[in-house]
Image (spheres, helix red, strand yellow):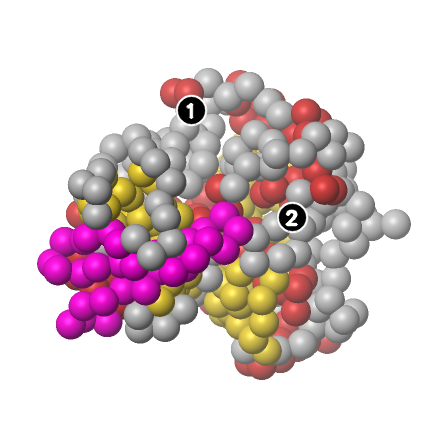
Amino acid sequence: MRLEDFNFDLPLELIAQHPAEERSASRMLHLDGRTGLIQDRQFRELVHHVQPNDVVVFNDTRVINARLFGAKDTGGQAELLIERVLDRQHALAQVRSSKRVREGSSIHLFGGMVARVVCREGEFYRLRFQSDLDLPAYLERHGSVPLPPYIEHLPSENDAQRYQTVYARMPGAVAAPTAGLHFDDAMLAHLEECGATLAYLTLHVGAGTFQPVRTDDPSEHRMHSEWFNVPEKTVLAIQSARRKGGRVLAIGTTTLRALESAAASGELQPGIAETNLFILPGYRFRVVERLLTNFHLPKSTLLMLVSAFAGMERVRAAYHHAIRARYRFFSYGDAMLLERQEQR
């Protein structure tokens, strides 16, 4: 495998800049990884692909207002993108400025907040925030929605609502689990009416989800680490579905990574942990049989994951079909339902 194996040409006009007028109004490409069959569907037809005793697993992380703007001691402008809130005063963050920030320097933010640079940690800086407000409260009041870099407009009130799933409960993500953006309350109710069990876990999506692969050999890439929690209730729901002949449908790659990470020992286990699981073609899946996802960036780790799930050649053909059929790509784009290829 080489990085170029996961490249494709995408017309810029297919990158969705705004969500569909209604959450569940997107299109859905259905790819059967077992047969290679590609079908054009509407997202609302997802209910026809869910059977009684299936379990549908969602990531209930909530996106925080992780983007901040300020000025350095020197007067130069700085943009912060919080990667992870560590406690009420500390965070890991990306810092963009004309010159690299130095340890011990300060960034002055709106409302009297000061962020002091403690040290560099890999791709990020450890910052200490000093203010009358603790950091989570400050972000809620003064931060802005961390839209992905390929969305070109400034965040609006509509983005504050639509770049968040309707079932988001646990604050901590700096990027949305975008497959879940298609669901509204009516769709969730319809899934339960079909006899499916809805289950939830939490994986706080980090800014590293947009980190490019910089090595020609993808296996040399090192994934960023993300915090996740798989509750016992969710494990029991999956075990019950298995006994009854049901299947596991993961809503989004973050849900899939959390479940597969929790099953690294060979059996799905509840608990809280960190994961840097990098799924490449050849990976053997232990938990998930079906995956709902959006369309991903060329050469990205997420494209590699779906290629592992449904087959490299079949995913490549599906993406070419999606481009010809003018599907909308990336976070605000259309959906893709994948059936797992047979594992040897």
The tag earlier along the polypeptide, 2 or 1, is: 1
Look at mark 1 in the image and give the residue it sits on: 14
Horizontal and vertical percent for residue 60? 43, 65
- Residue at 52%, 41% in the rendered image: 211
Query: Quick check: 7 left or right of 219?
Result: left
Residue neighbourhood size for the residue with mark 2, other residues' Cα within 10 Å, grouped as few (<14), some (14–19), many (≥20): few
What residue did someone put label 2 on? Answer: 222
Tag 2's secondary structure? loop
Number of numbered discs overlaid on the protein picture: 2
Q: Mark yes or no: residue 253 visible.
A: yes
- Residue 231, how many percent across, how many down? 54, 77
Name the residue located 50 percent from the left edge and 63 percent from the top edge: 203
Residue 268 lies in the magenta stretch = no
Judge from the rendering whether residue 93 lies leftward or rightward of residue 291; answer left or right. Answer: left
Image coords of residue 140 (percent x, y)? 22, 62
Q: Is residue 255 visible?
A: no
Magenta region, main secondary structure: strand
Q: Give the position of the N terminus as an image quadrant.
A: top right
Label 1: state its secondary structure.
helix
Q: 163 above or below 247?
A: above
Q: Position of residue 272 (x, y in %)?
A: 56, 75
Q: Which residues, given as a range, are shown in magenta?
A: 106-134
**Vertical position of residue 232 compared to residue 92: above or below:** below
Give the left or right position of residue 89, taking residue 240 as reference. Answer: left
Observer-nearest residue: 342 or 112?
112
Three-letter amino acid code of the residue under disc 2: Arg
Q: Amino acid at mark 1?
A: Leu
Q: CA distance from mark 2 to mark 1?
A: 29 Å
